[in-house]
Amino acid sequence: MNATVTLADVVRLLAENEGEARRGLSMVPSENAMSGISKLPMLLDPYHRYFFNESDHPDRWHFRGAQKLRDLEMNLTVPLLRELGRAEHVSVRPLSGLSAMTLVLAALGGENGSTVVTIAPENGGHFATPSVARRLGLEVEFLRGTGPHELDLDHAAELVARVRPSLVYVDQSHCLFPIDVASLVTTVRAASPGTLVHVDASHWFGLVLGGAFRNPLDEGADSVSGSTHKTFPGPQKAVVLTRDAGIDQRVRDTQDYLISSHHFASTIGLGIALLEFRDCGGAEYARAVVAHTRRFGRLLDERGITVAAKERGYSAGHQLWLDTEADGIAPKVASDRLFAAGLRVNFMAGLPGFPGQGVRIGLNEPTYQGLAGDDLVELADVFAAAVHDTSPSEDLAGRIAALRLRTRFGAAVGSTSPLLENALALCADALRTNPLVSRSAQVIAS
């Protein structure tokens, strides 16, 4: 059967999408951008290679394609994760947040028939956690609370004491405010001392590494995982961190048969992104994400869009939830109008506290791209005009393209985020002195 899409179609569609991406702005909270230099390994030979010999044992180089680059994982990515995550043990094997979830449940959830406790969907728990756990032969019970962002610790104490779970898996997926991990850990320890507590910090991970959120390991959690492409501006991947050597060994014993290729080039890209994050303003970026999110919630509220959790300052992190149904506009219609204006957002059911669908947005990528100050006012004006359909979409798209143009080339125009601008400056000498790297990087630099 002949393919209906030709190679010419592929190139054309990719080019069209790239043009739209450079003129538009993603506000999907589970996505982020990354620098050109951190994407570079995925264009080069490491993308095709396996890497298994973490110990650098001379007899274990069964796959030799990564041998010269072994230090980029073991002496760059892993030590930076230990440093920024304040963890002695790190796994970079998971391919995504869901891959990390599966690994942790398989490693720490116990034998078939063991019970794991996780957060109820109406309190923000991830939709996939119970299904993955049950497919691994585990029983599932739910932590619940009186509101979408609080847990009932009395209920948690009773539940944990009664079922004695092997693992409490804290899986906030839909989240505006983090739960109190320290209080939950104290509750679990008192009710069932042998129960482990794992925190899936995927949405918060960049805020944790940047110090804007408290590290769950400091709060007493036994382990933490996170995807590296939401609030952290890195590749689509995930990691597991712990300070407990026994837990680390259980994860390693399990990952050997759950994950084969861990996408070595992405792991190198993660190391570059971590280096940029540490040395080029990651902490400032994390604080700016939180500040921009709260400010943008207020700006939208002032422009007649109903924003959830107004009474609590809209958000403690990077997400905002918009109840456009309350404003007489179906979420899909709002999303379509925003897309026509060059803004990409989520609309979905299942947001805690929403009877139907809502619009979910994030300020993580706009902050990474460099929007700040009056840019946020302009963004809010365009956003509200698109939702309320008060201006032609082509005019609004032009205004968003102008915003992106001011931030796109960073150091050249002086309007990018400090993290991205400083990262560009850091790698400038390397690009100038290596023609091969320079030519490759120019393709993806922006």
Image: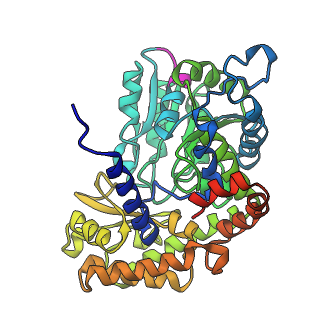
- Left of 5 or right of it: where is 107? right
Which of the two residues, 267 or 15, is positioned nearer the viewer here? 15
Q: Quadrant of the N terminus?
A: top left
User: Of 55 and 89, which appears nearest the observer?
Assistant: 55
Q: How is the image coloured?
A: rainbow
Examine the rendering and report whether any part of residue 430 can be seen.
yes
- Residue 169 in the image: state x and y as whole percent: 50, 36
**Is residue 109 one of those drawn in magenta?**
yes
Q: Residue at x 40, y 18 (%)?
A: 137
Along the horizontal axis of the image, is 331 left or right of 373?
left
Q: Nearer the viewer, residue 445 or 221?
A: 445
- Determine whether 381 is above or below 67 in the image: below
Residue for point 41% across, 27% down: 133
Up-down: is 376 above or below 16? below
x and y, in percent, of residue 209 in the image: 67, 53
Q: Quadrant of residue 401?
A: bottom left
Query: Exactly how many numbered labels are in the figure?
Result: 0
388 in the magenta segment: no
Q: Quadrant of the C terminus?
A: bottom right
Residue 305 occupies which quadrant of the picture? bottom left
* For residue 122, side relative to residue 426 (left or right): left
User: In which image quadrant can residue 140 be found?
Assistant: top left
Magenta segment = 106-111
Residue 379 in picture, x, y percent from top left: 43, 79
Visible in this render: residue 219?
A: no
Residue under the point 39% across and 29% down: 132
List x then y, in percent, for residue 298.
44, 79
Answer above or below: position of 383 versus 42. Answer: below
